[in-house]
Image (cartoon, helix red, strand yellow):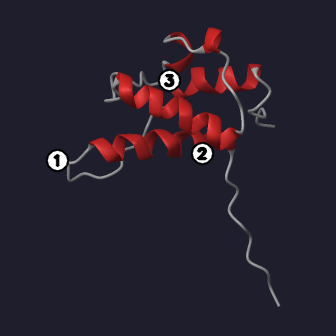
Amino acid sequence: MQMLAQPVVTSEIRLVTLVEDILARNASGETSGRREIPIDGNLIDIGMTSVDMVSLMLAIEAEFDVMIPPTEITPENFRSIATIEALLSRLGSFPQSP
């Protein structure tokens, strides 16, 4: 009997999914559905609001079981998926890809 391979869900994919979910909740008038989020794309430029950023921060803390210190809650750390990855790596909550 052949076992099916389970898809690998990386931390990066989990992070992108969080951003996509928040954007999808706000896309009430859009019919295009989910869109691809560039890793280095500016999250404000792709439609994230300040309320979305707070939701994202809380979702990241829950998803990755981390508490983001107040000193790390800066626009620079939440500018893009890449900057959030770097923040989580510094906090020891986001393993580096091999």
Q: In the depicted view, which residue is nearer to us: 56 or 3? A: 56
Q: Earlier in the sequence, mark 1 or mark 3?
A: 1
The x and y percentages for residue 36 are 41, 42
Residue at the disc numbered 2: 13
**Residue at the spot of label 3:** 80
Residue at 74%, 33% in the rendered image: 94
Image quadrant holding the C terminus, namely top right
Quadrant the N terminus occupies: bottom right
* Mark 1 surroundings within 10 Å by alpha-carbon count, few (fewer than 14), some (14 through 19), many (20 or more): few
The amino acid beneath tag 2 is Ile
* Amino acid type of the residue tagged 3 in the rendering: Ser
Q: Quadrant of residue 49?
A: top left
- Is 23 placed left or right of 64 in the picture? left
Provide the residue designation for mark 1: 29
Q: Judging from the image, what secondary structure is the residue with disc 2 in?
A: helix
Q: Are marks 1 and 3 in contact (CB under 8 Å)?
A: no
Crowding near pointer 2: few (<14 within 10 Å), some, many (20+)? few
Residue 39 visible in this rendered orientation of the protein: no
Callout 1: SS = loop
Q: Residue at x 29, y 42 (%)?
A: 26
